[in-house]
Amino acid sequence: MPKYVIVPVASVGCGKSTVGKTLASVCGFGQVQNDDITGTNRRPKFLQAILEQLESHQVVYADRNNSSVKERKELVDGLRKELGNEVDMVGLQFVHNQQTIPALKKITQERVFARKDHQTVSTATLAPQKIYMIMGGFIKRLEPFTDAEKKEYKLIVDLPVEKDNTADNVLRLLEKIKDNSATAPMLEDPKYTDQEVRDTVQNLIVSETKSEEVLQKEKEEREKNRKRKPADKSKGPRKKQPKLTFNKGAKKDLDKSSGA
């Protein structure tokens, strides 16, 4: 029976990790999260972790942004080198294009600020503008699957990024897998229901989302910072205050008068 690796292509906040966790829960797939890999040489470690998971799982979700053609090729080549034709690839492409990017930015930013702390974009330690910049950088760097790449994949599924549609995306992916003869073996004995998928996604979102009280407080703080007037630079730099100098003679007179 062939092994499979699911390779998502996404920017921050698209819901890729929630999709992976849901598949792990309802289908028993393995999942390797790049955020859990630390230190140097993270790419070889990521590949090794997937290979280890494949020893006990038929399907493994490669939970990483996988945003560049280069890093995806490196991953696929590494899998082929170790497993040859015993492993097949399935691609998930969270849709990014000129028409969808404005809405995508709004949705993903809302998700990032709503969820609990994250290693890549920590709302606890980074200013909002810094987070916007990091997320924008991920979107700019994202490279969709090329025609040459697609030949390495048994199936590529496009997933829209819309508000509260993660459960729909999981169900869409599972349906595409079942309908494709090359990937149907991934789900030979499905034991989940649509409702179980929806409940799992909802539970994950609730467990990873800040309380309403915290969200409201953070929103008010961001609004306050946004309304704060920037420093007026039109008047030029502030004049330096003259340094205080101490007159030695005056010090002696002061000492005498004080009886020192």
Image: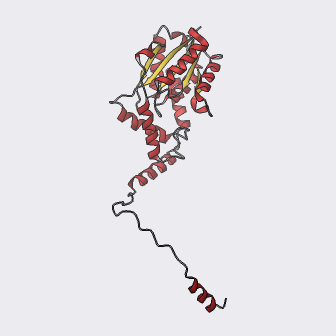
Residue nearest the observer in this picture, 48 or 196: 48
Q: Residue at coordinates 57% horizontally, 29% vertically from top-left?
A: 34
Q: Residue at coordinates 41% horizontally, 51% vertically from top-left?
A: 223
How many numbered discs?
A: 0
Residue 106 in the image, given as x and y percentages of width and height: 39, 38
- Kindly give the residue lying farthest to the front in the view shown: 249
Q: Is residue 155 visible?
A: yes
Residue 250 in the image, given as x and y percentages of width and height: 56, 86
Residue 29 in the image, given as x and y percentages of width and height: 58, 20
Tell me how the rendering is colored: secondary structure
Quadrant where the image shows the N terminus: top right
- In this rendering, the answer to whether 231 lies above or below 80 is below
| Residue 110 found in image quarter | top left
Residue nearest the observer in this picture, 58 or 243: 243
Q: Is residue 254 left or right of residue 163?
A: right
Residue nearest the observer in this picture, 219 or 195: 219
Q: Is residue 154 left or right of residue 255?
A: left
Residue nearest the observer in this picture, 78 or 229: 78
Q: Residue at coordinates 58% horizontally, 23% vertically from top-left?
A: 24
Residue 109 in the image, given as x and y percentages of width and height: 44, 39
Q: Residue at coordinates 47% horizontally, 73% vertically from top-left?
A: 242
Quadrant where the image shows the C terminus: bottom right
Q: Is residue 257 left or right of residue 160?
A: right
- Kindly give the residue lying farthest to the right in the view shown: 260
| Residue 225 found in image quarter | bottom left
Q: Is residue 163 visible?
A: no
